[in-house]
Amino acid sequence: MAGKVQRADTAADFMARVIARGFGVPSARMIESTRNPRVQSLLRCVESRELFVLEGEKFILDAAASGFEFEEIFHDDHLKPGRLTALARHRTTPVRREVLARFCDASSPQHAVGFARRRESAASEILASAGPAVYLDSVQDPGNLGAIARILEAVSGAGLLASEGCADLFHPRALRGSAGSLLRVKAASSVDFRLAAEEARKSGREICGTGGRSAEDLFSASFEKPVLWAFGSEGSGLSPAVRRHVERRIAIPLAPPVESLNVAVAAGVILFTVTSRLRS
């Protein structure tokens, strides 16, 4: 048993040295316990939303390519040497699997976890950019938020605005649902729709919401200007505070007995339909 432990420790130390050389930073001593002060410090930073967690090499590399700044990267001894050499300037630390699991939302932890600083765009910058913009009104499911971000990137959208009470832009399930799009699409949280509507009008956008008794049929409605789209949760729809500033209501015609669509599905149908129409 002692021999096996010695071989595992030697392999871990060797891996740490190899990866550290690839990163160009000094080799760090392996963290073996979730009670380690550094682990506890990072947990507090994540809970306070100073940092967010990136699970897996792909998301870490995507975030680095998009210019996010890392506080630290944890990895286990199964990470392939040189796999993350693109992150040469970042601090990396070898840890046990149980330490990785402490930070992972997924049931099976990845071999690397990154801790990056949050970054958002100004609502005015998003609304002044080309392409459709989306405002999410109290959409609380992170998977739906992530899926909509992915759709926005697919249609070359301007960006995503989220109301107070929306799912966290950097929630692990939102990042997974977006397949990394949330790391590239411009996004802003806790946006007041009244102010967003004013900015949208200044930028030459019309403001459209979904549903309502007098809503226009999506497939017969015409669109000549870029749009700020407002989507509410499937259960509650748009709040009165948002409906007050919406200029047009658009509905997707549905065959009975279907009464509504998941918000991400509805956003996909609308954004692809209108984008293709404007391009033609």
Image (cartoon, helix red, strand yellow):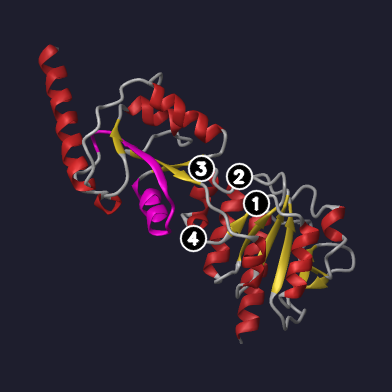
4 or 3: mark nearer the eye: 4
Q: Earlier in the sequence, mark 4 or mark 2?
A: 2
Q: CA distance from mark 1 to mark 3?
A: 16 Å
- The secondary structure type at the circle numbered 2 is loop
Where does residue 205 sit, x and y in percent of width and height?
73, 75
Q: Earlier in the sequence, mark 1 or mark 4?
A: 4
- The residue positioned 65% from the left and 51% from the top of the image is 189
Q: CA distance from mark 4 to mark 3?
A: 15 Å
Image-quadrant location for residue 81: top left
**Along the horizontal axis of the image, is 87 left or right of 155?**
left
Instruction: Answer whether labels 1 and 4 touch (C-beta < 8 Å).
Output: no
Task: Identify the residue under disc 3.
Answer: 172
1 or 2: mark nearer the eye: 1
Mark carried by residue 184: 4
- The secondary structure type at the circle numbered 3 is helix
Q: What's the amino acid at mark 2? A: Asp
Q: What's the amino acid at mark 3? A: Pro
Task: Identify the residue under disc 2.
Answer: 168
Q: Earlier in the sequence, mark 1 or mark 2?
A: 2
Local crowd size for mark 2, using a 10 Å CA cut-off: few (<14), some (14–19), many (≥20): many
Local crowd size for mark 1, using a 10 Å CA cut-off: few (<14), some (14–19), many (≥20): many
Task: Identify the residue under disc 1.
Answer: 189
Q: What's the amino acid at mark 1? A: Ser
Instruction: Answer whether labels 1 and 2 touch (C-beta < 8 Å).
Output: yes
- The residue positioned 24% from the left and 51% from the top of the image is 85
3 or 2: mark nearer the eye: 2
Look at the image and tell me whether residue 218 can be seen: no
Look at the image and give the residue range highlighted in magenta: 57-78
